[in-house]
Amino acid sequence: VGSAGARLAARLDGSAGTSWLVAKGCAVRLTWSSSSDQLGLGTPPVTLPDVPSLPARVVQVACGEAHTLLLALDPAPRVFASGANDYGQLGLGDTMPRRDVARAFEVKALDKSALIGGVTCGGNVSMAVSQRGDVWSWGCNHESGVLGLGTMPVACVPTPTPIGHLRRKVRAVQAATTGWTSLCLTHLGAVFSWGGGFCGVHGHGHQEDEPTAKPLRDLSEVAVVQLATGPL
């Protein structure tokens, strides 16, 4: 059941006013028409489907607050992004808004040699995990340290950046983020977390922020198989 749920989660996701699904290698965007009944006809809002044109077969979709990442195979993995880019969360190297917010742009920094195996989003943060177990993060660099890049004095990181505290130390198979706190799962079932500690959400037994990845000691005797995060 857990693996089936993970496969389903990879093919369905959504954010405010928009849902995405993957069907037959295509990414389908579903947006809601206006919920206001200005004509007084009592008609409910309807979904308006849209299929962005991509040069590869889509296998995963992930949504943040107002942006989306798409993982496609061509046959090598390629990552595309669409939506808002206020904090560089599209990974295009800048924070400039795109004129066509519905268009999907390829994240060139994650080329075919990166061998990306999964993507995830949360808030204004984006993350990717390679088939080798490396983790990249980019987007809004909250003071919580959600990107896992240490205490960097910058408001955003617009280019995918490897998380150095994890690289070559663990082999990650999944990542998740709320946009304030982030986690990753290793191939041995261990969980690492970093970022905001409000209410102890990072699981380290305190409420201080953690700017670098640390293992969850209380789960050291448990082989975790899947991660999931709720809203911020």
Image (cartoon, helix red, strand yellow):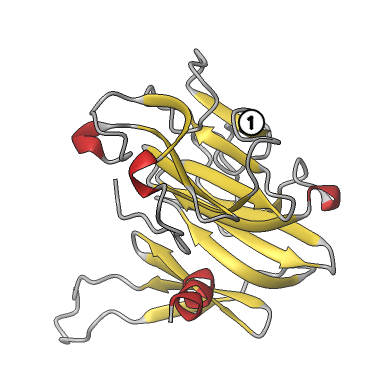
Q: Is residue 103 above or below residue 155?
A: below
Is the C terminus in the top left, top right, bottom left or bottom right quadrant?
top left
Q: Is residue 104 visible?
A: no
Q: How many residues crowd mark 1 within 10 Å: few (<14), some (14–19), many (20+)? A: some
Q: Which residue sits at x=50%, y=32%?
A: 147
Q: Which residue sits at x=44%, y=75%?
A: 2
The amino acid marked with disc number 1 is: Asp
Is the N terminus in the top left, top right, bottom left or bottom right quadrant?
bottom left
Q: Is residue 211 visible?
A: yes
Q: Quadrant of residue 168?
A: top right
Quick check: 74 left or right of 7?
right
User: Which x, y percent locates residue 184?
Assistant: 50, 47
Q: Residue furthest top?
A: 153
Q: Residue furthest front?
A: 221
Which of these two is toward me, 111 or 129?
A: 129
Which of these two is toward me, 22 or 7?
A: 7
User: Which x, y percent locates residue 139?
Assistant: 53, 35
Q: How many marks?
A: 1
Q: Is residue 203 above or below residue 131?
A: above
Tag 1 secondary structure: loop
Q: Is residue 62 above or below residue 192?
A: below
Q: Which residue sits at x=75%, y=45%?
A: 110
Q: Which residue sits at x=68%, y=32%?
A: 93
User: Which x, y percent locates residue 90?
Assistant: 59, 44
For label 1, the residue is: 94
Q: Quadrant of residue 205?
A: top left
Q: Is residue 66 above or below residue 135?
A: below
Which of these two is toward me, 161 or 67?
A: 161
User: Which x, y percent locates residue 136?
Assistant: 63, 40
Quick check: 104 left or right of 198?
right
